[in-house]
Image (cartoon, rainbow, N blue to C red):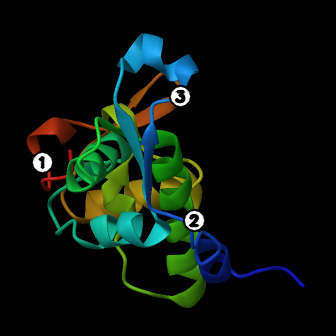
Amino acid sequence: MKKSWRDRLAGYPHLPSVKEIPAPMRKRHGEGTIATPSPREVEEAMRGVPEGRLATVLGIGEDIAVRHHATIGCTVTTAIFAHMVAHATEEAQERTPYWRTLKIGGELNPKYPGGIEAQMARLEAEGHTVVQRGKRYFVEDFAKKPSGTR
């Protein structure tokens, strides 16, 4: 039997965690610590983005790092959990506005439920302008609409 998205999110009882930045990452990020969020932290951050505002996985990761007194936040894990939260929200018909959480640079996430088209429709319904650059889609002037989670 296939696990629900909510059950998948519950499968990380060891998180959040703060550890030393792994050696392969030190060249880019330097010495310090990395905060890996729990799915609940990512969901709470996504749920807190009000209409008219936007967040990015990078911004959520940075906010989580600050909360845990870490040097950096793990944006890869944050992005994975954002994807899972989006699907859990649709599956259970919950009210987390996942479409307001963008990829780095304000890019729409094709892995969210319904793909680019569904996210674009929801964002445009809230007054945002989506522009295409090559094969990718971005919210125009997304940096001017932060929620506090960049």
Q: Residue at x 84, y 80 (%)?
A: 2
In this rendering, position of residue 138 left or right of residue 114:
left
Element type where label 3 sits in the image: loop
In this rendering, position of residue 3 left or right of residue 101:
right
For marks 2 and 3, give the one nearer the viewer: 3
Residue highlighted by disc 1:
145
Residue 136 position (above or below residue 123): above
Residue pushed farthest top?
A: 27
Residue 40 position (above or below residue 78): below
Comes first in the chain, label 2 or label 3:
3
Residue 43 seen anywhere in this rendered image of the structure: yes
Instruction: Tell me, for residue 84, which label it has, or none.
Output: 2
Give the image quarter of residue 40.
bottom left
Comes first in the chain, label 2 or label 1:
2
Residue highlighted by disc 3:
22
In this rendering, position of residue 109 left or right of residue 11:
left
Element type where label 1 sits in the image: loop
Residue type at tag 1: Lys
Residue 131 seen anywhere in this rendered image of the structure: no
Comes first in the chain, label 1 or label 3:
3
Please name whichever residue, 19 or 105, is drawn nearer the observer in this view of the structure.
Answer: 19
The percent coordinates of residue 146 (x first, y second) are 14, 49
Q: Residue at x 34, y 40 (%)?
A: 58
Residue 35 position (above or below residue 87): above
Residue type at tag 3: Pro
Q: CA distance from mark 1 to mark 3?
A: 33 Å
Q: Mark 2, residues whose alpha carbon is within 10 Å: few (<14), some, or many (≥20)?
A: many
Give the image quarter of residue 27.
top left
Instruction: Tell me, for residue 35, which label it has, or none.
Output: none
